[in-house]
């Protein structure tokens, strides 16, 4: 897996503009939630190959499954508006809930992280997650109109569907 594909997959899995539209927290709280998300994704990436071996799941089969989940999530994000952000919580406790969970750490992000780490290595996964989460933090610091965030989120959702199809095809041909 190329580094560019890893970055695209992690960005598509996290969908920074869409995640930003779901957040009402201060940029420092979003940054703390992003750091927590990276830490969990690193742990998943390190344990991912062992988990796949323990469950007797081949990397190509897992790629197909991740591609299906990502394609469905991308299609749902294209069809639906982002949910309203929860009330802005005070303090760094908000970095865990609602920033880390349920907004930043989502099933598709976790699955993509494991897939990228298994196929491209931890460096690729860490670079991809870092780029995607830096975009979330940057968007949280910027004052953007809701329509701009929605349009950017739809663009990344389309990217998610495209890279998901690539992941599925790659997984099928590798079986």
Image (spheres, rainbow, N blue to C red):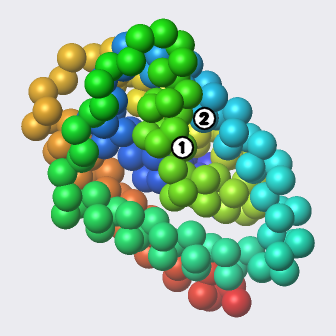
Residue 107 place in picture, x, y as percent: 54, 57
Task: Name the residue at 29% across, 65% down.
Answer: 76
Q: Is residue 132 visible?
A: no
**Please, is residue 68 above or below residue 150 in the view?**
below
Residue 56 place in picture, x, y as percent: 84, 80
Residue 66 place in picture, x, y as percent: 56, 70
Name the residue that disc number 2 marks.
37
The quadrant in which residue 148 appears is top left
Mark number displayed over residue 105: 1
The quadrant in which residue 40 appears is top right
State the residue in front, 4 or 142. Answer: 142
| 3D distance between C-alphas at marks 1 and 2 | 6 Å
Q: CB under 8 Å between callouts 1 and 2?
A: yes
Sort mark 1 into few (<14), some (14-19) or many (20+) by Cα contacts within 10 Å.
Answer: many
Task: Name the residue at 27% across, 17% down.
Answer: 142
* Tag 1 secondary structure: loop
How many circles with numbers are drawn on the protein? 2
61 on left or right of 8: right
The quadrant in which the C terminus is found is bottom right
Residue 31 place in picture, x, y as percent: 51, 19
Task: Name the residue at 32% across, 51% down.
Answer: 156
User: Mark 1 vs mark 2: which is more N-terminal?
Assistant: 2
**Please, is residue 60 above or below residue 94 in the view?**
below
**Please, is residue 4 above or below residue 94 in the view?**
below
Q: Is residue 35 visible?
A: yes
* Tag 2 secondary structure: helix
Task: Name the residue at 32% across, 19% down.
Answer: 88
């Amino acid at each position: 897996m190329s580094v560019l594909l890893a970055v695209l997959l992690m960005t598509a899995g996290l969908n920074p503009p869409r995640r930003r539209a779901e957040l009402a927290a201060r940029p420092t709280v979003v940054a703390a939630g992003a750091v927590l998300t990276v830490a969990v994704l690193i742990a998943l990436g390190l344990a991912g190959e062992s988990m796949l071996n323990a469950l007797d799941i081949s990397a190509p089969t897992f790629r197909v499954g991740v591609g299906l989940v990502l394609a469905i999530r991308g299609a749902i994000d294209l069809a639906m508006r982002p949910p309203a952000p929860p009330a802005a919580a005070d303090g760094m406790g908000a970095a865990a809930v609602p920033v880390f969970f349920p907004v930043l750490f989502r099933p598709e992000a976790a699955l993509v992280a494991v897939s990228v780490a298994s196929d491209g290595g931890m460096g690729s996964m860490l670079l991809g997650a870092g780029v995607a989460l830096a975009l979330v933090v940057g968007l949280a610091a910027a004052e953007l109109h809701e329509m701009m965030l929605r349009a950017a989120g739809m663009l990344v959702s389309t990217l998610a569907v495209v890279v998901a199809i690539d992941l599925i095809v790659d997984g099928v041909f590798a079986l």
